[in-house]
Image (cartoon, helix red, strand yellow):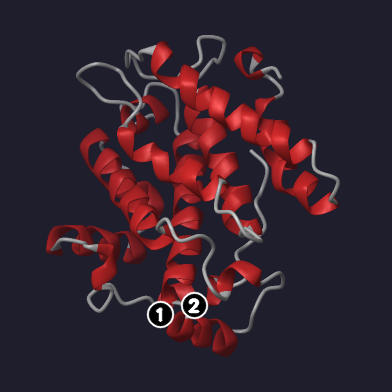
């Protein structure tokens, strides 16, 4: 996997306090898991299929509630360069949902990197984490990632680049052509067909734009999808 550049507000992540953020509608148990994940190595949090799936769903819930349907965040979405700790913490005060959106994208990327590095035979896989155990379908919680791609306005370069990249790896897990180590997990391949087509459509629209910024948004995702025939445009 390629390395994604850090969020401009990376230095604010350690200052996030979940209790005051009522907009996120987190339960006490969800807050506890988020806090636990902050103090423990990511591999520890993803040490069994149940906890791995639960953590992913909470991170995606945080993304869903923070990004909302009102378009890009007021301040964080316009940032380009990495801020100092003081500047980033100032953004956490003035645009908390923008910071939390970047936090959720960053954590999702970390989760995917960790899962892809697990040894063959592990019971915790991309399949067991992002697909339902009962029917093998893609979890419904993936949808905020697509919404981030279509923020409108001036967008949010970090969030959109990261969301597209993470979504590509999640969806490729469900493609028959991909040699993912699923640990015997059965996946319903048809559950990724429409989401993958939606991702490809967004990539195509960015490539048809004239700006170099549009190309930079999709380059990591294009690199990821190059080995996936199901995603050919």
Q: Residue furthest top?
A: 176
Question: How many numbered circles does the render carry?
Answer: 2
Q: What element carries label 2?
A: helix
Q: Is residue 181 visible?
A: no
Assign the C terminus to one quadrant of the image.
top right
Is 172 above or below relative to 35?
above
User: Do labels 1 and 2 touch, CB within 8 Å?
Assistant: yes
Q: Can residue 66 be seen in this view?
A: yes
Is 98 above or below relative to 93?
above
Write the residue at 48% across / 17% down. Answer: 193
- Residue 2, by quadrant, is top right
Is 195 above or below relative to 102?
above
Write the residue at 26% across / 34% down. Answer: 49
Q: Nearer the viewer, residue 215 or 119?
A: 215
Is 198 on the left-hand or right-hand side of 48? right
Q: Residue furthest left?
A: 28
Mark-to-mark CA distance, 1 and 2 = 5 Å
Question: Where residue 12 is drawn, which disc sits there?
Answer: 2
Q: Mark 1 points at which residue?
A: 15
The location of residue 32, given as percent across then percent down, is 19, 63
Assign the N terminus to one quadrant of the image.
top right
């Amino acid at each position: 996997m390629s390395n994604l550049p850090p969020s401009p507000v990376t230095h604010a992540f350690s200052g996030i306090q979940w209790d005051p953020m009522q907009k996120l509608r987190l339960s006490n148990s969800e807050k506890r898991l988020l806090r636990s994940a902050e103090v423990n190595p990511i591999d520890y949090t993803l040490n069994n299929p149940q906890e791995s799936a639960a953590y992913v769903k909470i991170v995606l819930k945080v993304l869903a509630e923070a990004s909302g349907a009102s378009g890009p965040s007021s301040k964080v979405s316009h940032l380009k360069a990495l801020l100092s700790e003081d500047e980033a913490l100032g953004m956490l005060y003035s645009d908390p949902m923008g910071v939390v959106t970047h936090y959720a994208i960053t954590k999702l990327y970390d989760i995917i990197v960790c899962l892809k590095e697990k040894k063959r035979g592990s019971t915790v896989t991309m399949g067991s984490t992002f697909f339902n155990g009962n029917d093998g379908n893609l979890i419904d919680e993936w949808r905020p990632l697509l919404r981030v791609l279509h923020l409108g306005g001036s967008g949010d370069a970090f969030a959109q680049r990261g969301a597209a990249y993470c979504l590509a790896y999640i969806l490729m897990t469900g493609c028959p052509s991909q040699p993912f180590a699923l640990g015997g997990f059965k996946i319903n391949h048809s559950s990724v067909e429409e989401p993958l087509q939606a991702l490809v459509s967004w990539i195509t629209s960015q490539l048809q734009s004239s700006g170099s910024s549009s190309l930079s948004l999709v380059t990591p995702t294009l690199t990821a999808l190059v080995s996936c025939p199901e995603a050919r445009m």
